[in-house]
Amino acid sequence: MIELRPFEKLGRFRNDWLNAHYHFSFSGYHDPARVHHGALRVWNDDEIQPHTGFPPHGHESMEIITYVRQGAITHKDSLGNHGRTEAGDVQVMSAGSGVQHSEWNAEDDVTKIFQLWIIPRNRGGQPSWGARQFPKGDRSGQWAVFASGTGENDSLRINQDAKVLGATVKAGETLRYELPKDRYGYLVVADGEVRLNGQTLKARDGAAISGGETLVLEGVNSAELVLVDTV
């Protein structure tokens, strides 16, 4: 089964520095039909104004994956980690037994990110943070594994039987993905436009997939894709 979630129907929040759209219930937005999809709990589409961001705050027992769509995000945490992740790249924070962190846009232009939260297989554990570059040329017409429970293909490791993947497709190009019937998929078009099993998804639209599907993605124009495959 594939349920489309158009960008214009997502939850919304806006203040003077943050323009956020929520694929799942989050903060002041609650939809009982969209609390989670398997172990995927949060998919936020955030636009952060220059020289602003999220002040220090705490997390525990959550895998937090950030994909930078435009600009860069700067991270600092109570473990002593401090890093800057640029567009096209990924950072992962395993909150474990608890960690304090801040994230902000230190740039002169707007930063745009997808932030995903995945419920871990076990509560607690040692918190950690890491980041990796994922050149778009390396995922042209094929899936790259950004993060996974096994660390496959040198991906960032998360504490769950899940994968976060990315790909780019050109107009007229076709890309496939097999999602087994006992798993959950969630796809978002970061940029461009595709047809997913004949249904059109535009930039920032989502699709919740379950029940086992062969995903056939056809590029309407050049597009950038992010996919979660999880229990």
Image (tube, grey):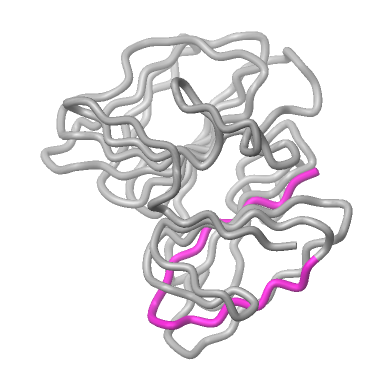
Establish if 168 lies above or below 160.
below
Establish if 105 lies above or below 151.
above
State the image quarter where residue 203 is shown: bottom left
x then y, percent, for residue 17: 20, 28
x then y, percent, for residue 70: 29, 50
Q: Locate the C terminus and report the quarter of the image it occupies.
A: top right
Establish if 132 lies above or below 142.
above
**Dominant secondary structure of the residues highlighted in magenta in the image:** strand
Residue at the image point whose x is 48% and y is 77% from the top: 169
x then y, percent, for residue 28: 44, 21
The single residue placed furthest to the bottom in the displayed view is 172
State the image quarter where residue 84 is shown: top left
Residue at the image point whose x is 53% and y is 67% from the top: 167
The single residue placed furthest to the right in the displayed view is 182
Magenta stretch contains residue 230: yes
Q: Which residues are magenta?
A: 213-231
Q: Locate the N terminus and report the quarter of the image it occupies.
A: bottom right
